[in-house]
Image (tube, rainbow, N blue to C red):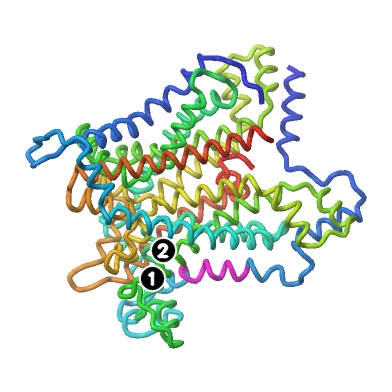
Amino acid sequence: MAELRDTLATARTEAEPAGAPAASANQAAVARAMRRRGDESRFWWLTPTLYIIFLMLPIYWLINMSFKTNTEIVTTMTLYPHAPTLRNYQIIFSDPSWYSGYINSITYVVMNMVISVSVALPAAYAFSRYRFLGDKHLFFWLLTNRMAPPAVFALPFFQLYSAFGLIDTHIAVALAHCLFNVPLAVWILEGFMSGVPKEIDETAYIDGYSFPRFFFKIFMPLIASGIGVAAFFCFMFSWVELLLARTLTTTDAKPIAAVMTRTVSASGMDWGLLAAAGVLTLIPGALVIWFVRNYIAKGFALGRV
Amino acid sequence: MDRTWNNKAWFMVLPVLVLVAFSALIPLMTVVNYSVQDTFGNNQFFWAGTEWFEEILHSDRFWQAMGRNLIFSAIILAIEVPLGIFVALNMPRSGWGVPVCLVLMALPLLIPWNVVGTIWQVFGRSDIGLLGYYVNAIGIDYNYVRDPIDAWVTVIIMDIWHWTSLVVLLCYAGLVSIPEAYYQAAKIDGASRWAVFRYIQLPKMNRVLLIAVLLRFMDSFMIYTEPFVVTGGGPGNSTTFLSIDLVKIALGQFDLGPAAAMSIVYFLIVLLLSWVFYTVMTNYDAER
């Protein structure tokens, strides 16, 4: 038991970001200054600032529009709402056909997240710890599904899910999104799991842990950040995808992104309402991103940095 | 890591296998089935052999869409990768700026793709959009609905806005993994800024850059939603990429045969690219 605790402690320290090596404090400070600023220029902050402004401008414009009346949007060019109104948001929050879009989206996204991560966990463990017949081919086949254009699958999905009577249900979209999310989750988790030394598994078995007990009690806490990142990426890719989600739903499970197209009506576009609906779709992403901010990059690198 | 040989590991992979087979193999077989048959409605099918494939491979429309897609991918890679590296190099490495930068930069990645389209559709309009209005105000005639070049510029800037952060985040992750000692050594040797970049930072970013380039290439090769929302493939066919064309044929005109044949050709191309990606990646791992 003591042995296991030691190995765990080592693993934890190894998992920590590498601190500065034992160099003299002065040298370390110089080097840190170099790293922080990139080069000796005093204007290092200029690039990130300009880039962020470039990113935020279109988003600002959307938020700006969402607080305007349609008359103000169409007739004048104002940089901020002169007559701010909450009318657009009120419509969304009071009309079930609008806000149920959000509930639908979140329902299938969460379903997909749970399914993807729970099937990917054992598979990723198998890929990171064992060699077996056809493992490399299988891994490649999974990868091809991440790379498959959703447009190719739109029509056959529709027919497949029709045959099973699943059209217009949340589970249909959740299953369809597994096509690209399961491979992604396997990849990310495999990357994180390979970073955990194998000695931990072996020590646990020597200490008499059964596999399930080891997996849930020891292994999963060790890769908790990996699970978080995989879940985040499943959330993200399911949240942003629309082609399949729209093809597989008609009314009861229609995602918010598809409901948005309703703003085009005979009397012209309801720009304010469209903008308000768009702003509301940014919020879930912005919220979850905060929790994984330190691991986002590692996730995008499929757990391999 | 040396892994032990254990065929029982297949049982752990089984759930993934079943799930992905259901959502990938069966639909793919449906597509194969349609691609060799012809239909006159009423669910009556006739054997058509390779007719659809010949039609697709000889049609200008397919090759033009393919050409547009390749040009688009080349342009955005040529802009996004250097820009992403540049921004990553200038990002703060410690302090309060790090989380702020990371969160703000990652934000466009989490916006539903059709909302991205909507944002740019509005932003670029010359009557109510900030960009369109002021570009026209300074005397440049800009209208992405009518002018093919303006439409292309809009779609490209939109993609840069949407995805450059991916390159930034990946490069940043590569940069922070460089040990402090490397920079100390460079400082002692009096290495120039360029030398630090060329001989320390770039080699360390190799791997993440590879992932960035290949992910961006794949995703731009199957881009659908964003340009569809902004331009609808127009004006004319100028921004009709492969995916847009495919959905037009399959769900718009319901020409199952040609659509299925096109899907297969498209999928085979992606498969080939994935294979190149995978081989390069695993070889790179082996060398390390």
Q: Amino acid at mark 1?
A: Ser
Image marks 1 and 2: residues in contact by CB distance under 8 Å: yes
Label 2 residue SS? helix
Residue plotted at (58% across, 38% down): B281
Q: Earlier in the sequence, mark 1 or mark 2?
A: 1
Front residue of A80/A202: it is A202
Q: Amino acid at mark 2?
A: Val
What residue sits right under mark 2 in the picture? A279
Q: Quadrant of the N terminus of chain A?
A: top right
Q: Is residue A10 left or right of residue B30?
A: right
Label 1 residue SS? helix
What's the mark number on residue A66? 1
Is A102 drawn above or below residue A205 in the view shown? Answer: below
Residue plotted at (82% across, 47% down): A20
Is B112 drawn above or below residue B179 in the view shown? Answer: below
Q: What is the CA distance from the residue labelled 1 to the residue labelled 2?
A: 7 Å
Q: Overall secondary structure of the magenta stretch?
A: helix
Residue plotted at (50% across, 44% down): A232
Residue A240: x and y in percent read 41, 51
Front residue of A215/B203: it is B203
Residue A33: x and y in percent read 81, 60
Q: Residues within 10 Å of mark 1 (few under 14, many from 20)?
A: many
Is B37 drawn above or below residue A4 in the view shown? Answer: below
Q: Is residue A248 left or right of residue A148?
A: left
Say whether mark 2 and mark 1 are on the same chain: yes
| Range covered by the magenta-colored residues | A49-59
